[in-house]
Image (spheres, helix red, strand yellow):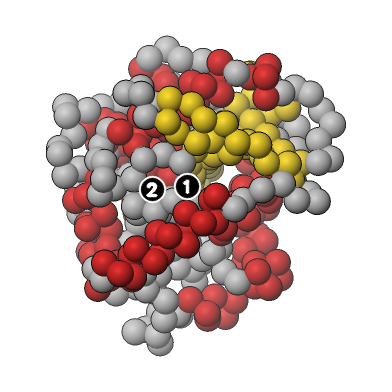
Amino acid sequence: MSGKYPIHPDLYELRNMMEPLLTMDPELIRLMTDQFRREWNNHTSDEEIIVSKRTILSYDGVPLELQIMQSRQQEARPAPCLVYYHGGGFMFPMSKFQFRLVREYIKGTSCVAVCVDYRLAPAVSFPAPLDDCYRTLEWTFQNAADIGIDPHRVAIGGDSAGGLFTAAVSLMARDRNAPSTVGQMLIYPTTDARLQSASMKKYTDTPVWNAPLTKMCWDLYLKNGDHGLRDYASPLEAASLAGLPAAYVEVTEFDCLRDDGILYAQALEQAGVPTRLFETQNTTHAFDYAREETFMNSSLIKTSLAQRIDFLKQIFEM
């Protein structure tokens, strides 16, 4: 498998990487979950970023922890805001890799970031995690003055499963006539529960992530069905994407989810939504989860970060 896909040299460390989910080893899954949970709990302020934590209630009364991040160099007030939903197959907490990405967005745009520890499968299923994500956006608008942000410059974004939440929250906000976000940033997202795309059928053994893992995670997420909310469960099946905020969609080449992003970007464009599609080459899913040295020095990763930050600057009108 390691030599089957011509992955960019910067990503060689990922060539043989597979999530422990592949074997469904409960102990490995538990260890991975515990590690990410520690990373969430131990994430605190440092010399560059100020981190504050808040607890809000979900719609059904469950405490949800938020982390609000901003640069120590933050000057402009009120600041733009990025509400960010992390990936993790619907199963894992936010990790150090995603915090690292969010820090880059903060430094690149001087925005405030709001992240939520939404509830996870298999303990819960759709729509609870999505509702937690929407509740976070609602709270952000309601508390804009308190956290020093401009409610007219709020964007949402996420990676992988977080990209799905980004798409679905955008639809929910439109349908509920909520305050408008200025944009949505979807990084190698999953968008289609049908799992019938060409890339889903092709990439069954790719490093980092593959089609069997995707099916397993969707089965957990929708184990109790879609509750008649198919548009939000599987956004590529939505009856209409008209009226959504401007979108940035980034996909990776050797990734079963590649076509989820491409097809969603095309559907957004057809619906009249300003959309920027960026197709990375010789990449795996979550390619930016690289070691710190690679992350800081890879021209491949730097190019993607620059594209994302440029989009955020554009929608924040910076």
Q: Amino acid at mark 2?
A: Ala
Q: Residues within 10 Å of mark 2 (few under 14, many from 20)?
A: many
Image quadrant occupied by the N terminus: bottom left
**Residue 264 versus residue 157: which sits nearer the camera?**
157
* Local secondary structure at mark 1: loop
The residue under the point 48% across, 76% down is 14
In the rendered image, residue 181, in percent from the top left (x then y), is placed at: 54, 24
* Local secondary structure at mark 2: helix
Image quadrant occupied by the C terminus: top right
Q: Amino acid at mark 1?
A: His
Most extreme residue toward the bottom is: 3
Q: Which residue is mark 2?
A: 161
Cα distance, mark 1 to mark 2?
A: 7 Å
The residue under the point 66% across, 48% down is 44
In the rendered image, residue 93, in percent from the top left (x then y), is placed at: 44, 51
Q: Is residue 89 visible?
A: yes
In this view, 162 is above or below 136? below
Q: Which residue is mark 1?
A: 86
**Residue 51 versus residue 174: which sits nearer the camera?**
51
Mark 1 vs 2, N-terminal side = 1
Classify residue 155 as left or right of residue 213: right
In the rendered image, residue 152, in percent from the top left (x then y), is placed at: 63, 18
- Dot 1 and dot 2 residues touching (CB under 8 Å): yes
Disc sitting over residue 160 in the figure:
none
Classify residue 52 as left or right of residue 233: right
Q: How many marks?
A: 2
Quadrant of res 53: top right
The residue under the point 41% across, 81% down is 16
Q: Is residue 252 visible?
A: no
In this view, 190 is above or below 114? below
